[in-house]
Image (cartoon, grey):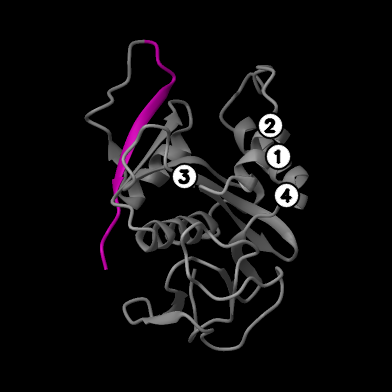
Amino acid sequence: MRFIGPPTVITASRARPGTAGPGVARPGTARSGPPAGTGRNRAAGRYVLSCMIGERVTGRRVIRTAVPAEVDSVVALHARARATYYPDGLPQDGADWPGAWRAAIERPDGQVLCVVEQGRIVGLASFRTPEGAPAHTVKLFQFHVDPDHWRTGIGTALHTACVEQWRADGRRTAVLDVHVDNRRARAFYARQGWCADPGDPPAEGDHHLWLRYSVPGE
């Protein structure tokens, strides 16, 4: 995502635990210039919230925290993205995806970021520290871009936003698992610097690969 000068920063609709960022604002309520509690990220040449990632606006594209009212749109995008690497159709596994996504959005210890273009959600990322993992580890549970918007820079922009959030939260390591048949996703993660997790090699017959990412410091 390119920024020309410091973008408008809009605070997310809910604060993350333990943060001391600016007051909560409704989605779509903009502030001009750097709001209280922000610092200047000189390397990136833009303002970022010191304790949390708020909404980013540049042209038509916004990256922000998803809200429960958007669950139907989130589930629909997730299904479209998953369908691209299940050539025989989505498995009927009985999963309650609306419930799962609502829980992810509402979890106080997790975050769901979405990319919005012209009022439509076109990208999703869900992450939190997995059960039993060290506090400095975060797992990227879901990462999807609407197939109609592939190769437009959305995935790279969303990944950058995730990394900024992880760095702000003091995370040092990120992990994920990716379906072996999702070659497009595997190539994308490789370009972003993810590599095979040496501590979790795939078992025989496993349909997922386990990847690891070192979160860069300041």
Badge 4 crowding class, 10 Å Cα cut-off, few under 14, some 14 to 19, many 20 or more, is: few
Which residue corresponds to the image point at 46% horizontal and 44% vertical from the top-left?
128
The vertical placement of 192 against 183, above or below, is below
Report the amino acid beneath label 3: Arg
Q: Position of residue 59 (x, y in %)?
A: 62, 76
| Mark 1 or mark 4, earlier in chain | 4
- Dot in front, 4 or 2: 4
The mark total stands at: 4
| Mark 3 or mark 2, earlier in chain | 2
Label 3, label 2: how many angstroms apart (C-alpha)?
A: 18 Å
Callouts 2 and 1 close, C-beta under 8 Å? yes
In the image, residue 96 lies in the stretch drawn in magenta: no
Which residue corresponds to the image point at 70% horizontal and 27% vertical from the top-left?
96
- Quarter in which the C terminus is drawn: bottom left
Q: Which residue is mark 3?
A: 128
| Mark 4 or mark 2, earlier in chain | 4
Give residue 97's mark: 2
Label 2, label 1: how many angstroms apart (C-alpha)?
A: 7 Å
Q: Which residue is mark 1?
A: 75
Badge 1 crowding class, 10 Å Cα cut-off, few under 14, some 14 to 19, many 20 or more, is: some
Q: Position of residue 74 (x, y in %)?
A: 69, 45
- Dot in front, 3 or 1: 3
The vertical placement of 179 against 26, above or below, is above
Report the amino acid beneath label 2: Trp
Badge 2 crowding class, 10 Å Cα cut-off, few under 14, some 14 to 19, many 20 or more, is: some
- Dot in front, 3 or 2: 3
Which residue corresponds to the image point at 48% horizontal and 70% vertical from the top-left?
20
Quadrant in the rendering for residue 115: bottom right
Residue range highlighted in magenta = 205-218
The vertical placement of 188 against 32, above or below, is above
Q: Which residue is mark 4?
A: 68
Q: Decide if residue 146 is in sight here.
A: no
